[in-house]
Amino acid sequence: MGGMGFIENYKAVIMRDSMLISINVLEASRKYGAKRFFFSSSACAYNTELQKDPNNPALSEDMAYPAMAEAGYGWEKLYTEMMCEHFMEDFGLETRSARYHNVYGPLGTWRDGREKAPAAMCRKVLLAGDSGEIDIWGDGDQTRSFMHIDDCVEGLRRIMDGSFAEPINLGSAEQVTINQLVNLVERIAGVDIQ
């Protein structure tokens, strides 16, 4: 798993490795007659400027273009979504793609830049304690949606059982600012940071 800290520091490695994995698994699915292929995409496929704008929080599927995806990782996701569409058109391989939005849950990664925002904020708040400060990327007003892993699995099952073949968002409709997330973690942890 890679959170934003990891994604920002290893763009080429992530893009290269993810593309090789995706292309090889997609080709093997075609070659060996898989009935349906699932691609795990990401909200990072969306234009990064849209993701920074707190006045434009809800990302809909039609907003992926004009493209300006997250460097490395996001571009690989957008490219592989297109490969899935072409494999369906050219070879008849049914494909499904879901753009995940901040999946969290038990046993998730919580350190070394690989964690998602909920785990990162929990770690930062606990390490800061009552008197500390935490580092938040941006001003904290940027919004995100978060989804528990159990809800993600249920959504994935529905996508695979359904007939909708275009990339689709898989996440909560509820938008939360990073500042709201930090405040929630503070309340739960019983601390008050700067």
Image (tube, helix red, strand yellow):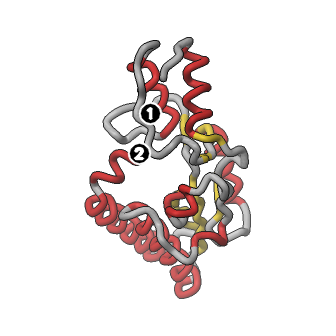
Task: Answer above or below: position of 189 versus 41.
Answer: above
Sequence-earlier tag: 1 or 2: 2
Q: CA distance from mark 1 to mark 2?
A: 9 Å
Q: Disc 2 residue type?
A: Gly
Please give the residue where the numbered disc 1 appears in the rendered image.
120
Please tell me which residue lies in front, 42 or 155. 42
Residue 172 percent coordinates (x, y): 69, 46
Task: Answer above or below: position of 68 versus 192.
Answer: below
Label 2 environment density (alpha carbons within 10 Å; few <14, some 14–19, many ≥20): some
Please tell me which residue lies in front, 38 or 120. 120
Residue at 57% x, 75% y is 65
Residue 96 percent coordinates (x, y): 60, 66
Residue at 71% x, 44% y is 174
Task: Answer above or below: position of 54 versus 79.
Answer: above
Residue at 58% x, 64% y is 97
Residue 123 percent coordinates (x, y): 42, 25
Q: Quadrant of the N terminus?
A: top left
Tell me the element at label 2.
Answer: loop
Residue 133 located left or right of residue 40? left
Label 1 environment density (alpha carbons within 10 Å; few <14, some 14–19, many ≥20): many
Please give the residue where the numbered disc 2 appears in the rendered image.
3
Q: Disc 1 residue type?
A: Ala
Tell me the element at label 1.
Answer: helix
The number of numbered discs placed on residues in the rendered structure image is 2
Residue 36 percent coordinates (x, y): 58, 67
Residue at 55% x, 57% y is 51
Image mark for residue 103: none
Please tell me which residue lies in front, 38 or 68. 68
Residue 99 visible to the viewer: yes
Q: Is label 1 in contact with label 2 (beta carbons under 8 Å)?
A: yes
